[in-house]
Image (cartoon, rainbow, N blue to C red):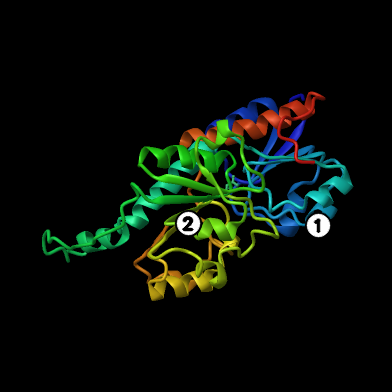
Amino acid sequence: MTKLTKILLTRHFPDAVIERARRDYDMTLNPDDAAWQGDALITNAEGMDGILLSSSNKFTVDVIAGLPDSVKILATFSVGYEHLDLEAARSRGILVTNTPDVLTESTADTAMMLLLNAARRVRESLEMVTTGNWVGWTPTQLLGIQPGGRRLAILGMGRIGRAVAHRARAFGMEIHYHNRSRLSPDLELGAIYHATPEDLFRHADFLSINCKMTPETTRLINSDTLDLFPENPVIVNTARGGIVDDDALIAALRSGRIAAVGLDVFEGEPKLNPGYMGLTNAFLTPHIGSATVDTRNAMGFRALDNLDAYFRGEKPGDRLV
Ligand code: DGY
């Protein structure tokens, strides 16, 4: 890589990331942080050697087909890569990288934060206090569900799922999980394996969704599978919104079949299914799983490490294609 190598930053990444990119490259920055799509991505890629992008930029078959020949690498500032058509990139000989590992801890923290907020009815508590409607302590006010001694079912026991398990053990929870393949005992650490998601759901007093979104996991939480849960479960999702059928979940929250949810990701975000809005048993956050200064810097540095390796003529560590 040389200062002559041209890279495009499609979003306003953290300042430390922009500074490093400016130091090492001939860098072009999206001036107003708009979430470029389609033609805007193609036009702004003109003359670029590489692109540092985010999950808010959809690199579809058409966008990838329209990229100038100069673009050799797409480095996404995310662990997820559903926004990138890997097959289209492969067929054009464009290399793609992501940023695994560095957001494991902050995402697991977010899952526990959602779990506790949903189980302990924090949305209702905040409303009661901030609207001046708190009449004082009563023995039966805002009774929630205690995680300790209950079963936490983890759907997807990769790095993030295991980091959630680590935290939940400290709360006295019994860990159950489903994963495409069973973990070795040193990674399982006593967690109970279920060969199918359906069997996992039957044991889920709490469910944490930590799997990738794939054709198999899309809408895996739906009206049929919600029926399998024990009474009063709490569901949290820090993975991808599309794993949940929103209409089914909203109906189950309304009827009380599901006690509460904590959701950080939504299908079609930033637009949410309006059914969630009035539900006091839905604790909702705006995709903040990785939103700490440390993690976002680390994601940016990891994406730049991948670009640096490629432009030095080496194989980037996080190569997807
Ligand atoms: C990720 O890294 O995949 C986060 O969800 C942000 O897109």
Q: In the picture, which quadrant includes the C terminus?
A: top right
Mark 2, Cα crowd under 10 Å, few <14 / some 14-19 / many 20+, is many
Distance from the alpha carbon under mark 1 to that under mark 2: 40 Å
Place of residue 177 in the rendered image (x, y in percent of width and height, measured from the top left): 54, 48
Secondary structure at badge 1 equals: helix
Point 43% across, 63% down: residue: 230
Q: In the picture, which quadrant includes the N terminus?
A: top right
For residue 47, which numbered disc appears in the image? none
Q: Which residue is mark 2?
A: 203
State which quadrant residue 27 falls in: top right
- Amino acid type, label 1: Val
Point 13% across, 60% down: residue: 139
Residue 241's place in the image compared with 78, above or below, is below
Q: Which residue is mark 1?
A: 61
Residue 187's place in the image compared with 33, above or below, is above
Mark 2 or mark 1, which is nearer the start of the sequence? Answer: 1
- Amino acid type, label 2: His
Residue 114's place in the image compared with 9, above or below, is below
Place of residue 13 in the rendered image (x, y in percent of width and height, measured from the top left): 57, 40
Q: Which of these two is toward me, 221 or 83?
A: 221
Secondary structure at badge 2 equals: loop
